[in-house]
Image (cartoon, grey):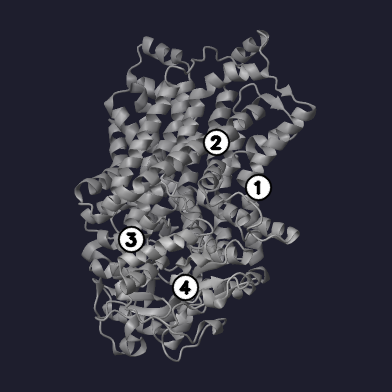
């Protein structure tokens, strides 16, 4: 029952959009989009997903393994530094990287000044391209995979790893044969989050000019003025995400191993020396620089250079925190309801998760259209409390899935024997939910709450559409400046979003680094 | 604190917890207009209020609203968003919409509001006297407030001035591999295409778009500023931009100025239809609760003072005679402007997008 309610709350804006797609007659624009653009969009989204996913895995899994299992210079710092990119929205990284790597940016200008070349005399990677977009998205999204992979590695049974070692497996072999298979469900969950987020990205794709489905959805509405055509494209996107989820399910499937041992002991990190130690430090450092250090450093530089006035920004900061906080609380409650109900299985639980996931994959602008359609049914205007409520609702609809995944992963890692024991002792399903599953799920709650807050803080299109009169947020300011091509002015609010997002990210890092029982450091 | 709690009520107490534990009283922004965020903007002082739905995002607009408030005692409430977002908001609000004024940076955008029935015809002698006829909707649904030109920026070391005298030149095979443009989704490109369709018809317009695409040095990307930077860096020799982006760079940091010293401006079609003009325009909302205040606001913007507030930061061109030209615009005056009726730009918008798509101009 709670799952059903949560599912309905989440689904309503989505359903409104779908209804618009089905029953509003789509006009000439839809025909044009279908014939000329649909394949281009579909190919764009699939390529971005494939490339972003690959890059996320390449960035995240080795890094998580390195910082968990080895000692090398800077390890303890990298362990939490590598989470920081989570705080920077994709569109902000896109602004910063396009500024850094663009033809008029500092890197290429310096190159031309040094060599006397013109822009046509050399080849330079093009950031305004599909690979460029994938790189930028992977930079901001890999922490999802890093977080889930690391917590899976950290909470792995030491016994299994030591058994592997005692049987003569080297670090490489125990990674590929023992640790990775055991961590696969967690990695798949993190990757699924990252990919859904990548599929729903609008800001970065629009800024870098890559035609994806989401870009097409917003464009169908903005350029052609046909929300119905946008809704139909959203159908295609939802279908694509459904395939993605089923694949993840299947990947998690039976391959997930049950941890039989929950005895904790300090795992001795292998000390790296010489080249391998330097290699580990350098690769972690390069990853941090690319995903966070360089782009954020550029924003800092531009903010200082312009001496941007901070006064109007503080109000926006407070507004951002209020909005993101209320959205996160709303979404967190819904996520908790869904996760606990999922243990009981059944159609209601499935429906709730499905609606959460489809909400997550739909761009905020489309959900905001759904919210406007709801508002149209009632004798209210989009101001004051109504606007705030609509916005919190859209945040919840959009982000609840991001909260369910970490908690579901925590539950999935718990040995099945726990719930079997509860059942054999005669616990009712609700008692099991509250006394066994809830405490376990809450171990993932910090991650869930954090992700929800940061997500809502970064959200742009729905915030832009639904916020009340005179109510600016940081993301709205950053977008406003960037859309007027004043990146220098956009730098400060973009930076503040990142900083505001950093606080919970650092809290989380701290919490995680203490979370390993038996850890002494 | 009280204010936050008042806002929070309808949010089912969700905000309550947060406001109680996390937030000190929200400092009111010194620049924000008088009504606090979140309050229903209905309450009024003696002079009432005016609710503005604006698709502009300039800091200088805040000064503009504050000046209007100071001079008239009329409170200004603002919702800034994109034009399509504002349109959907008004659709959802229907006849209850609190909007009095709609401002957008393109005549095509105002056309959409008018088509949807969200503007109303007003008569104001002050407005019709101040604003030239071709820059406003004939029945008074909206008024062009400032002008911008879509012009050609070129690298004089690669092309000569007489190679870039028309928009048609951009499609000339002579410029193969030399042209930079931004995405066709951009409203400035859509409106330019709207005018071209109006002059030569859809077929020839599509041919033109294909010619431009064949000449591209790189796929369409970036904003107008990025096109200027690409010409300055030598990546291409010719680009299509709105004049004020170039003017802002020319008045910017030393690094930015350097980019404009390497480029020259061409005002296309001087021997033909004249250079493409677009406007920042505003109209009175169909269900405006404070119609008189809305008209007063528009009339204020059509004074030399209002024009200066509108253009000083943005580097648009004032439309009202006797207004001061913003600094740095000396190079951008004294040429032939197109007198293509701006209300027609919107008519061709969807067709323009479809033509760009078919031509492969992303």
Mark 2 and 3 residues: CB-CB less than 8 Å, in contact? no
* Quadrant for the C terminus of chain A in the image: top right
Number of the label disc, if any, that sits on residue A293: 1
| Mark closer to the observer (3, 4) | 4
Q: Earlier in the sequence, mark 1 or mark 3?
A: 1
Q: Nearer the viewer, mark 1 or mark 4?
A: 1
- Measure the C-alpha gap from mark 3 to mark 4: 20 Å
Q: Position of residue A324 (x, y in %)?
A: 45, 49
- Visible in this render: residue B20? no
Horizontal placement of A296 versus B205: left or right? right
In the rendered image, which quarter is residue B3 located in? Answer: bottom left
Instruction: Please give the label number shown on residue B62.
Output: 4
Residue A428 versus residue B233: which sits nearer the camera?
Answer: B233
Mark 3 element type? loop
What residue does disc 2 label? A56
**Labelled pair 3, 4 in contact (Cβ < 8 Å):** no
Q: Tell me the chain of label 3.
A: A
Subunit of label 1 = A
Disc 3: which residue: A383
Q: Are marks 4 and 2 in contact (CB under 8 Å)?
A: no
Q: Are marks 1 and 4 on the same chain?
A: no
The residue at 37%/68% (across/down) is: B193
């Amino acid at each position: 029952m709670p799952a059903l309610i949560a599912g309905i709350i989440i689904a309503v804006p989505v359903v409104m959009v779908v209804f618009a797609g089905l029953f509003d007659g789509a006009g000439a624009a839809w025909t044009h989009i279908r014939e000329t653009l649909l394949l281009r969009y579909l190919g764009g989204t699939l390529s971005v997903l494939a490339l972003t996913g690959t890059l996320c895995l390449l960035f995240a899994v080795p890094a998580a393994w390195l910082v968990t299992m080895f000692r090398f210079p800077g390890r303890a710092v990298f362990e939490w530094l590598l989470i920081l990119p989570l705080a920077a929205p994709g569109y902000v990284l896109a602004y910063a990287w396009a500024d850094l790597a663009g033809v008029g940016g500092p890197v290429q200008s310096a190159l031309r000044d040094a060599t006397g070349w013109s822009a046509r005399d050399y080849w330079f990677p093009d950031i305004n391209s599909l690979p460029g977009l994938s790189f930028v998205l992977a930079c901001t999204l890999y922490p999802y995979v890093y977080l889930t992979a690391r917590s899976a590695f950290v909470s792995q049974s030491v016994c299994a790893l030591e058994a592997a070692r005692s049987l003569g497996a080297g670090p490489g072999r125990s990674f590929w044969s023992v640790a990775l298979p055991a961590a696969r469900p967690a990695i798949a969950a993190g990757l699924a989050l990252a990919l859904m987020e990548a599929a729903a990205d609008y800001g970065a794709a629009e800024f870098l000019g890559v035609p994806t489905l989401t870009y097409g959805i917003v464009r169908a509405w903005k350029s052609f003025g046909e929300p119905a055509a946008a809704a139909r494209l959203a159908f295609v996107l939802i279908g694509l995400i459904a395939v993605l989820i089923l694949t993840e399910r299947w990947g998690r499937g039976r391959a997930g191993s049950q941890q039989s041992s929950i005895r904790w002991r300090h795992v001795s990190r292998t000390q790296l020396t010489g080249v391998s130690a330097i290699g580990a430090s350098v690769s972690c450092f390069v990853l941090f620089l690319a995903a966070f250090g360089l782009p954020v450093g550029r924003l800092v530089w531009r903010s200082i250079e312009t001496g941007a006035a901070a006064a109007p920004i503080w109000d926006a900061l407070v507004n951002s925190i209020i909005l993101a906080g209320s959205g996160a609380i709303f979404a967190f409650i819904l996520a908790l309801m869904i996760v606990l109900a999922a243990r009981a299985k059944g159609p209601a639980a499935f429906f709730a998760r499905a609606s959460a996931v489809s909400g997550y994959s739909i761009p905020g602008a489309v959900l905001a259209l759904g919210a406007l359609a709801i508002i149209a049914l009632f004798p209210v205007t989009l101001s004051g409390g109504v606007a705030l409520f609509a916005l919190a609702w859209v945040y919840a609809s959009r982000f609840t899935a991001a909260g369910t995944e970490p908690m579901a992963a925590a539950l999935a890692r718990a040995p099945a024997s726990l719930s079997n024991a509860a059942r054999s002792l005669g616990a009712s399903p609700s008692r099991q939910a509250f006394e066994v599953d809830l405490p376990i799920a809450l171990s993932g709650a910090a991650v869930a709450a954090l992700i929800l807050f940061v997500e809502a803080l970064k959200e742009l299109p729905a915030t832009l559409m639904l916020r009340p009169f005179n109510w600016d947020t940081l993301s709205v300011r950053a977008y406003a400046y960037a859309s007027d091509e004043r990146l220098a002015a956009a730098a400060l609010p973009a930076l503040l979003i990142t900083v505001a997002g950093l606080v919970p990210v650092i809290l989380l890092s701290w919490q995680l680094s203490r979370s390993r029982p038996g850890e002494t450091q | 604190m009280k204010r936050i709690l008042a806002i929070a009520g309808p949010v089912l107490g969700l905000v309550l917890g947060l406001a109680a534990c996390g937030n000190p009283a929200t400092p009111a922004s010194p620049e924000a207009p008088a009504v606090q965020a979140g309050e229903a903007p209905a309450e009024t002082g003696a002079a009432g209020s005016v609710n503005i739905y604006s698709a502009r995002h300039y800091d200088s607009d805040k000064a503009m609203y504050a000046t209007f408030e100071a001079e008239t005692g009329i409170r200004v409430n603002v919702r800034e968003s994109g034009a399509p977002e504002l349109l959907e908001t008004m659709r959802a609000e229907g006849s209850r919409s609190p909007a009095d004024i709609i401002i957008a940076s393109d005549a095509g955008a105002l056309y959409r509001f008018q088509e949807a029935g969200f503007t109303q015809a007003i008569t104001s002698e002050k407005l019709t006297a101040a604003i030239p006829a071709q820059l406003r909707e004939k029945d008074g649904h909206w008024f062009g407030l400032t002008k911008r030109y879509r012009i050609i920026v070129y690298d004089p070391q690669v092309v000569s001035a007489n190679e870039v005298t028309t928009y048609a030149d951009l499609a000339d095979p002579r410029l193969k591999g030399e042209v930079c443009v931004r995405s066709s989704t951009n409203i400035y490109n859509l409106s330019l295409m709207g005018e071209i369709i109006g002059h030569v018809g859809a077929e020839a317009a599509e041919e033109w778009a294909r010619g431009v695409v064949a000449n591209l040095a790189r796929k369409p990307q970036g904003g107008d500023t990025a096109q200027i930077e690409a010409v300055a860096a030598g990546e291409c020799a010719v680009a299509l931009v709105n004049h004020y982006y170039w003017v802002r760079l020319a008045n910017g940091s030393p690094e930015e100025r350097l980019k404009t010293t390497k480029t020259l401006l061409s005002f296309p079609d001087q021997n033909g239809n004249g250079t493409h003009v677009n406007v920042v325009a505003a109209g009175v909302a169909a269900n405006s609760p404070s119609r008189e205040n809305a008209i007063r606001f528009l009339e204020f913007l059509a004074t030399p003072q209002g024009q200066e507030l509108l253009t000083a930061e943005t580097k648009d061109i004032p439309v009202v005679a006797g207004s001061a030209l913003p600094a740095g615009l000396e190079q951008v005056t004294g040429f032939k402007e197109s007198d293509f009726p701006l209300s027609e730009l919107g008519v061709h918008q969807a067709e323009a997008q479809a033509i760009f798509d078919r031509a492969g101009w992303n």
